[in-house]
Image (cartoon, rainbow, N blue to C red):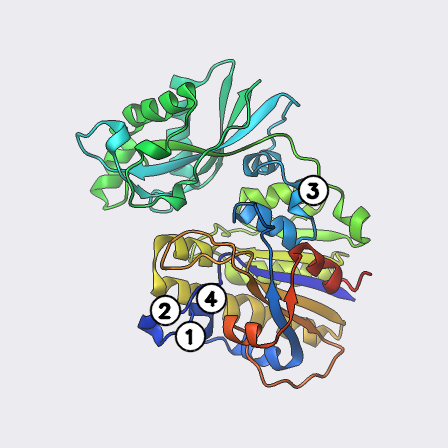
Amino acid sequence: MKYLVVLGDGMADEPIAEIGGKTPLAYAKTPAMDALAPKAEIGLAHTIPEGMKPGSDTANLAVLGYDPKQYYTGRSPLEALSIGVPMKDTDIAIRCNIVTVSDDDLPYEQKTIIDHSSSEISTEDAAVLMEAIQKEMSSELYQYYVGTSYRHLTIWAGGEVVDLTPPHDILGKKIGEYLPQDDKLREMMKRSYDILNNHPLNVERAKKGLNKANSIWFWGAGTRPALDSFEGKYGKKGAMISAVDLLKGIAVGAEMTNIEVEGADGTLETNWEGKADAAVKALLEDGMDFVYIHMEAPDEMGHQGSLERKIKAIEYLDARVLSTVVEKMNASGEDYRLLLMPDHPTPIACRTHTSDPVPYLLYDSRKDLQKDQLYNEFDAKKSGIVVEQGYTLMSKLLEKK
């Protein structure tokens, strides 16, 4: 028996009048999902524990079968594992986004946050800007490390876990009241604007019509994580396929294999087929029992507030990942179980994450079910099946008691 999770990050949404009161998932053309749904169990799962913030960190831990209330120590420490940054017990890891704030004559505190991803900046461009930050601002207490795209890392030696606001939660708002209370962190963010706004690379980006990556933004602080081995916990040899340091870091902590796919970048133009092919190869040729395929694009399109592009991301996931995986697994003759779901909603209306339960689809190739249902938020609710503790879905997938 082989096992797969196909995870559409932020894929769930709310009814939208513009598309007849449907959600993007219900509106999108998804023939592969439509074919699986009647043969599968469909329901709702709560992936965000009560009292915790709705992030891809807590939610993906839950989907992977780790109770966030037990295992979560912050988002950035998980990314530190992926980047390969060693952390001492006294270190604090902080997410260091490169964001776009308004390029105007107002004081830094009165500027508006325009874009949490700086036009989905490439890792190559971001590395140039992070080098400037490192040169000007690194110290014994604060070190900066390059991650992926707009997502980078700061290690604060001997620091403390402080309350910090995710930039994608405040798009279009003035930043003053959301800046860190810690004087030094706030000062470094302010100084970063002076370093980056007129950097030659940003001048060129502006000429090309791209958003300037003109400020760092701190959030997601936490301490060194300690996850149990996935294989030790569930008895399955597992692999992760993702373009995102967060997911790669979770895999490192869980002692799973990270599979790199050329051209996988977390955007709408990612190598969708490459991820699907790599997953099937891992299961059928490389001895893996379980593969987690993480697709970031629906979440990014939700943050951008682009309905058209979120629908397209869902359709790409269906046609270029799910369809390929199902077709090749069926052709192999290997029995398999597949879990399809988002980690959390990223509604177009609010452009950030919410804690609402998400629809899941659990398919078993050995079972010949015929139900009158499709895979979307409405049919999932109508099923009456609710998984209150999202982290128990992994045991359900793996048929573990």
Q: Mark 3 points at which residue?
A: 70
Name the amino acid, label 4: Ile
Tell me, yes or no, whether the two marked residues, 3 and 1, touch with CB atoms within 8 Å: no
Decide which of tag 2 and tag 4 comes sooner along the chain.
2
Name the residue beneath numbered marker 2. Answer: 16
State how far apart marks 3 and 4 are (Cα). Answer: 32 Å
Q: Camera-side residue: 158 or 155?
A: 158
Location of mark 4 (residue): 314
Give the Cα separation between the discs numbered 2 and 4: 16 Å
Say what amino acid the circle numbered 3 marks.
Answer: Gln
Q: Distance between the residues labelled 2 and 1?
A: 10 Å
Q: Distance between the residues labelled 3 and 2?
A: 36 Å
**In the figure, is residue 312 to the left or right of 401?**
left
Which of discs 3 and 1 lies nearer the camera? The answer is 3
Q: What is the secondary structure assignment of the residue under circle 1?
A: helix
Q: Disc 3 vs disc 4: which is toward the camera?
A: 3
Q: Nearer the viewer, residue 300 or 286?
A: 300
- Mark 2 or 1, closer to the camera: 2
Q: Do the residues labelled 2 and 1 touch (CB within 8 Å)?
A: yes
Numbered disc total: 4
Horizontal relation, residue 153 to residue 311: left or right: right
Q: Residues within 10 Å of mark 3 (few under 14, many from 20)?
A: few
Looking at the rendered structure, the kind of residue marked 2 is Ile
Q: Is residue 282 visible?
A: no
- Report the disc number at residue 27: 1
Give the mark, 3 or 4, whose residue is nearer the N terminus: 3
Query: Which mark is nearer the camera, 1 or 4?
Result: 1
